[in-house]
Image (cartoon, helix red, strand yellow):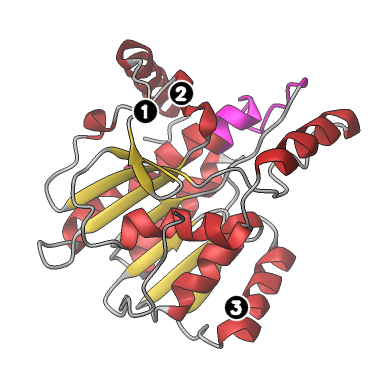
């Protein structure tokens, strides 16, 4: 039975950041969040045209766009992430929910970013980690028992090969973390792949896909549901599941990631 959202969520006291909102399920998540009247919804976009199209999509869908803003950020550029975070801290200064939703998938090729890092590693892991670390103090200062902070990472079925060790984030009480697998959905996640690779991927997706609208609900449900108060849990299609744990590997990944960010003078 697919999970469902209530229509009476009130986010009027919440400042929210959602990455990966210009395409795929992120676009639908942005539309749904905007409909819940957030205090402010910041949608980072690498492409200004896509960002403007997203804003028009939200306006035409539900009309709730007064508190929605498109800000420039490129996860394939660590300095861009740091600049976004610094601007947010200086201009907004409060944050209650952070959705690390953006991601890409590339097969059979290695593409390097301007930071000389493999693009999937940077966009899917390192840049969201940097964004979270840079905004963590702002979240801690903003939240309370009545208005808890929430940090969500959109995952995929491949999480069975590993799981982020959230304990290493050293989060204080009133901040809950989520690892979320929304389900198999047809998006442009693999838009940088070759024709054959895309064909095979699309063939697999068509066999198991769920509607994009339901995928968006699966992302939002664990975060907005008042019952989910325990931190560090994994949700598959909105339902809590047990992920595979390779703790030592993830501890090493954390240490390596932190060192890379230090080497790039990001933290």
| Structural crowding at the residue carrying mark 3, measured as other residues with C-alpha within 10 Å and reported as few (<14), some (14–19) or many (≥20) | many
- Counting from the top left corner in percent of width and height, residue 98 is at 37, 55
Q: Determine the CA span between mark 1 and mark 3.
A: 34 Å
Q: Are marks 1 and 2 in contact (CB under 8 Å)?
A: yes
Viewer-proximal residue, 37 or 264?
37
Q: Which residue appears at 66% of the width and 32% of the height? A: 113
Q: Which residue appears at 34% of the width and 20% of the height? A: 245
Q: Determine the CA span between mark 1 and mark 2.
A: 6 Å
Residue 121 covered by magenta stretch = yes
Residue 8's tag is none
Q: Secondary structure at mark 3?
A: helix
Pointer 3 residue: 58
Above or below, comparing residue 51 to residue 157 in the picture: below
Residue 160's tag is 2
Looking at the rendered image, the quarter that the C terminus falls into is: top left
Q: Magenta residues?
A: 108-123
The answer to whether residue 45 is visible is: no
Residue 243's tag is 1
Residue 22 found in image quarter: bottom right
| Mark positioned earlier in the residue sequence (1 or 2) | 2
Viewer-proximal residue, 257 or 173?
173
């Amino acid at each position: 039975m697919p999970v469902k959202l209530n229509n009476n969520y009130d986010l009027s006291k919440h400042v929210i950041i959602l990455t990966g909102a210009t395409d795929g399920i992120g676009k639908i998540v942005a539309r749904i969040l905007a409909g819940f009247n957030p205090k402010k919804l910041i949608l980072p976009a690498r492409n200004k045209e896509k960002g403007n199209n997203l804003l028009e999509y939200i306006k035409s869908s539900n009309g709730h766009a007064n508190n929605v803003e498109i800000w420039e950020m490129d996860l394939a550029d660590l300095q861009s992430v740091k600049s976004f975070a610094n601007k947010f801290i200086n201009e907004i200064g409060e944050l209650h929910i952070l959705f690390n939703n953006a991601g890409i998938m590339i097969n059979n090729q290695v593409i390097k970013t301007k930071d000389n890092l493999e693009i999937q590693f940077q966009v899917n892991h390192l840049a969201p980690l940097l964004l979270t670390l840079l905004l963590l103090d702002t979240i801690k200062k903003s939240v309370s028992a009545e208005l808890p902070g929430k940090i969500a990472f959109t995952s995929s079925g491949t999480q069975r090969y590993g799981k982020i060790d959230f304990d290493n984030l050293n989060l204080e009480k009133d901040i809950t973390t989520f690892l979320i697998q929304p389900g198999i959905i047809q998006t442009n996640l693999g838009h940088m792949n070759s024709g054959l690779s895309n064909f095979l991927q699309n063939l697999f997706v068509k066999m198991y896909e769920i509607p994009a609208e339901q995928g968006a609900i699966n992302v939002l449900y664990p975060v907005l549901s008042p019952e989910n108060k325990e931190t560090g849990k994994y949700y598959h299609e909105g339902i809590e599941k047990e992920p595979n744990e390779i703790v030592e590997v993830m501890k090493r990944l954390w240490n390596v990631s932190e060192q890379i960010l230090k080497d790039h003078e990001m933290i």
